[in-house]
Amino acid sequence: QSALTQPASVSGSPGQSITISCAGSSSDVGYYNLVSWYQQHPGRAPKLIISEVHKRPSGVSNRFSASKSGSTASLTISGLQAEDEADYFCCSYMGNSIVVFGGGTKLTVL
Amino acid sequence: QVQLQESGPGLVKPSQTLSLTCAVSGDSVTNNHCYWNWIRQPAGKGLEWIGRIYTTGSTSYNPSLKSRADISLDTSTNQFFLRLTSVTAADTAIYYCVREVLTGYFFTAWGQGTTVTVSS
């Protein structure tokens, strides 16, 4: 199966908002409300920050929000902070008990 | 709080079998509310889902691995395992064992990862 498509990199200044897109197809992102997002700092394991398109787990900052439109999911980080600099991955269910990840987006806080 | 810890050889020769163990603490592999997964990440690259196992022993795999992967579990030791046969350099990666919420298809707890290099 093909990976979901994410921009390789995005950047923003402290205090600004950025959005990372995750483009899939009508068979995965567009069909199921089962998109999740993960944050990964260098040398660390990924951490769940969004589940089921827009749900924020306990303990995750409300500066992180997410949505879906058609076959594209989006993660928005508002009030950018230096600690947000990390790689971000989206993931979607695509049926038949299979999930697929995006290629990842490197966020740089300028 | 659940903790997962991967272990296994850091170096495997091409064409041989990669074998990894995930020790689970703070939860049980018999928990019928979650799946137990393996996910890998080549250095500097994205994540690739390998497969999952449920407490019943039911498994699902990434079709791209062409049946090379086999995941099993041992309830007596609270561990689950990955075997990947006929490895090549393309299998060089950090391997994570991961807990997944049942029906949600999202991953709530990750091990720290173990690096496996395929090289002669």
Image (spheres, coloured by chain):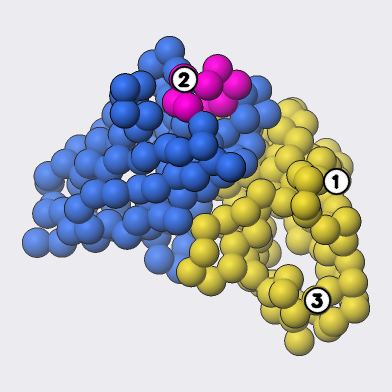
Please give the residue where the numbered disc 3 appears in the rendered image: A81
What secondary structure is found at the residue carrying circle 1? strand
User: Which chain is mark 2 on?
Assistant: B
Is residue B108 in view? yes
Between residue A35 and residue B38, name the one nearer to us: B38
Chain identifier, yellow in the render: A
Residue B32 inside the magenta-drawn segment: yes
In which quarter of the view is residue B12 placed?
bottom left
* Circle 3 residues within 10 Å: few <14, some 14–19, many ≥20: some
Distance (Cα) linking label 3 and label 1:
21 Å
Distance (Cα) linking label 2 and label 1:
33 Å
| Residue most extreme to the left | B120
Q: Position of residue A39 (x, y in %)?
A: 65, 59
Relative to B84, B108 lies left or right = right
Please give the residue where the numbered disc 2 appears in the rendered image: B30
Question: Which one is earlier in the sequence, the residue at label 3 or at label 1?
Answer: 1
Please give the residue where the numbered disc 1 appears in the rendered image: A67
For the residues bearing labels 2 and 3, Cβ distance under 8 angstroms: no
Identify the residue at horizontal 87%, vertical 61% (top origin).
Answer: A63
- The magenta-colored residue range is B28-35
Identify the residue at horizontal 25%, vertical 36% (top origin).
Answer: B83
Q: Position of residue A44 (x, y in %)?
A: 52, 64
User: Which chain is mark 3 on?
Assistant: A
Give the color of chain B as drawn. blue
Q: Amino acid at mark 2?
A: Thr
What secondary structure is found at the residue carrying circle 2? loop
Q: Amino acid at mark 1?
A: Ser
Of helix, strand and loop, which mostly describes the magenta segment?
loop
